Structures are given as structure tokens and as C-alpha cells.
């Protein structure tokens, strides 16, 4: 089992970036369980199944008391840097919201603390503008000598409003192709995607080029894998599970309960 102390990395950021890209391209879906601070990262790093660490921007923002998408970059950078230190040779991909004002500079600074990949949202900017922001990420990685593994996120479903699903699929495919052409590694399409929608996204964007989120009501990781999906992450839901457990045990303790004997000393 991995030690719960920080791990010293023996690999370069470039090596870890290449390892992350290889995990995206592998026939097996990459399952990343999102973390939000050092101790949550260490709990996941202790599991032998862990191949990469992904941070959850929503969860980090909540940790600091900010609404999702409003956390100042300096706080994001500090926390993800601490997670990188704990991760050692395990590649860390960070949620960097929409990349802030300058996606290239954001990427450069993220690489500076050891991040080797990221999610960056398009927030439905015009396609050409969003693709240019992807190009800036890739260029910044190249300038730093790191083949940065960008999981370019399109909000075609989560910000699509009440438009027909056909329009969201077409929008996601157009954006996904543009982002891949601009140098993104894979394309993140969050939303509760059924088998038919997922199949059409994979057909339009590419085999092992689509990344999804596991939400209540979504498919299982194995089902997404069979449809050609590259990666599945879980966003803020992992923190919600942890907070649900905390609130439930607190309710029990207020009712004169005791700490369960099955509790593991993970901190």
C-alpha cells in the first residue's frame, strides 16, 4: 500500500504527461476518482488501481467556500501543487475551470507546480475562439517541454439549455473535432449520456477521444468503455459522498451513537 506521506517524484513532468496520454489512448477506460485536497488524494493514491489523479474544481472551490467556477487561480494553483507533491510519480490532471484569462499562461504556471494535464471548459464560447484557447494551452506545454494532456471540455450539454439533444450532439461533435485539431488530447463532454448519445459522440469525435462524467443515472464505466470512451471521472460527486458520510455519522453521534468500528485510519 502506498505510504500516506508525500512521495518524491522520480519522473519528469514530460514523462508523466506522456503516461497520462497513453492511459487515454489505451483500450481500457481510464477511471479517475476526483480529489480536492491532499488527504483525499492520499486516500486514493493508497489504492493499487489508481493510475492517475484528477482534481475536482467544484470540490476545491467548496473547500475554500467559493461557488463553482469562481475560485481564484492562486488558490487553485496552491492546492493542486500540494496534490502533485503527494502524488509523486502518478500523473495529476487538474480542473482549471475555463483556463482563466490567458489559457497559455495558466498552463505554464500549472506545469510549474507539476500538473501535466487539465480540463478546461469552453463555456460555449464561439468555436474559433475556444479552439484558439486550446491552441494556447498546447503551445504553452510545448514551450515548457511538456506534451500537456488537455481534456478539452465542451459544455454543449450542460449549458445547452432546453435545445433538442440532436443540436447538442452536433455542437459537441463540431467543437470536439476543432479542439482535437487544435492539439487537445481528448474531449470532455459532461452530462448524463445514455448509450445512444455516447455512441454518436464517439462516432463523431473519435474512438478513445471522448471523456465522460459518472453521475447518478449515467452508464457504468464498463459500459462506456465498450462504447469506445477514453476516460471517466466523477467531478464533485466524490466529495458529496464523503460529506454525506460525515453528516450521517454526525447525525448518529448526536443521537448518542458511536464511531463505527469499521472506520479506517486514513489520515
Image: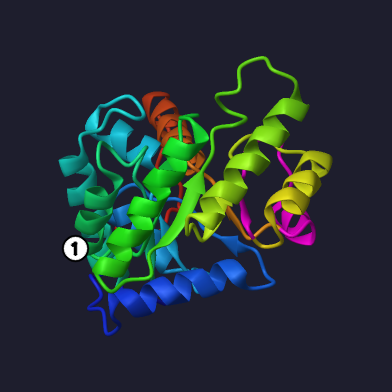
Residue appearing at x 33%, y 60% in the figure: 139
Q: In the rendered view, how is the structure colored?
A: rainbow
- Asked whether the viewer can see residue 236, the reply is no
Left or right of 97? Residue 176 is: right
Left or right of 181? Residue 65 is: left
Left or right of 98? Residue 151 is: right
The image shows residue 163 at horizontal and vertical percentages of 69, 17
Magenta span has 10? Answer: no
Give the image quarter of residue 167.
top right
Residue 56 sits above or below residue 31 on the image: above
- In the depicted view, which residue is nearer to us: 72 or 234? 72
Residue 207 sits above or below residue 131 on the image: below
Give the image quarter of residue 169.
top right
Q: Residue furthest front?
A: 128
Residue 30 sits above or below residue 156 on the image: below
Q: Quadrant of the C terminus?
A: bottom left
Residue appearing at x 74%, y 49% in the figure: 204
Magenta span has 221? Answer: yes
Q: Which residue is mark 1?
A: 112
- Asked whether the viewer can see residue 93, the reply is yes
Circle 1 crowding by C-alpha within 10 Å: few under 14, some 14–19, many from 20 = some
Q: How many numbered discs?
A: 1
Residue appearing at x 33%, y 76% in the figure: 14
The image shows residue 145 at horizontal and vertical percentages of 28, 74
Residue 266 sits above or below residue 106 on the image: below
Q: Residue furthest top?
A: 162
Q: Which stretch appears magenta?
A: 209-228
Left or right of 254? Residue 229 is: right
The image shows residue 19 at horizontal and vertical percentages of 46, 76
Amino acid at each position: 500500500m502506498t505510504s500516506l506521506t508525500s512521495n518524491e517524484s522520480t519522473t519528469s513532468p514530460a514523462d508523466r504527461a506522456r503516461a497520462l496520454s497513453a492511459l487515454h489512448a489505451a483500450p481500457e477506460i481510464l477511471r479517475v476518482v476526483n480529489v480536492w485536497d491532499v488527504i483525499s488524494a492520499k486516500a486514493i493514491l493508497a489504492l493499487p488501481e489508481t493510475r492517475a489523479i484528477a482534481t475536482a474544481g467544484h470540490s476545491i472551490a467548496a473547500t475554500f467556500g467559493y461557488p463553482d467556477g469562481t475560485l481564484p487561480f492562486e488558490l487553485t494553483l496552491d492546492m493542486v501543487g500540494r496534490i502533485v507533491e503527494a502524488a509523486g510519480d502518478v500523473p495529476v490532471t487538474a480542473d482549471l475551470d475555463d483556463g482563466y484569462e490567458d489559457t497559455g499562461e495558466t498552463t505554464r504556471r500549472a506545469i510549474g507546480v507539476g500538473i501535466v494535464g487539465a480540463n478546461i471548459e469552453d463555456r460555449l464560447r464561439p468555436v474559433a475562439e475556444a479552439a484558439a484557447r486550446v491552441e494556447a494551452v498546447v503551445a504553452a506545454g510545448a514551450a515548457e517541454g511538456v506534451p500537456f494532456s488537455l481534456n478539452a471540455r465542451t459544455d454543449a450539454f450542460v449549458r445547452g439549455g432546453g435545445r433538442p439533444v440532436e443540436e447538442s450532439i452536433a455542437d459537441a461533435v463540431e467543437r470536439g473535432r476543432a479542439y482535437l485539431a487544435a492539439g487537445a488530447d481528448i474531449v470532455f463532454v459532461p452530462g448524463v449520456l445514455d448509450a445512444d448519445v455516447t455512441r454518436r459522440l464517439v462516432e463523431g469525435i473519435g474512438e478513445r477521444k471522448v471523456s465522460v462524467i459518472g453521475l447518478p443515472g449515467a452508464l457504468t464505466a464498463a459500459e462506456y468503455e465498450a462504447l469506445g470512451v477514453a476516460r471517466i471521472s466523477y467531478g464533485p460527486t466524490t466529495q458529496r459522498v464523503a460529506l454525506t458520510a460525515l453528516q450521517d455519522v454526525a447525525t448518529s453521534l448526536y443521537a448518542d451513537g458511536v464511531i463505527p468500528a469499521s472506520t479506517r485510519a486514513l489520515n
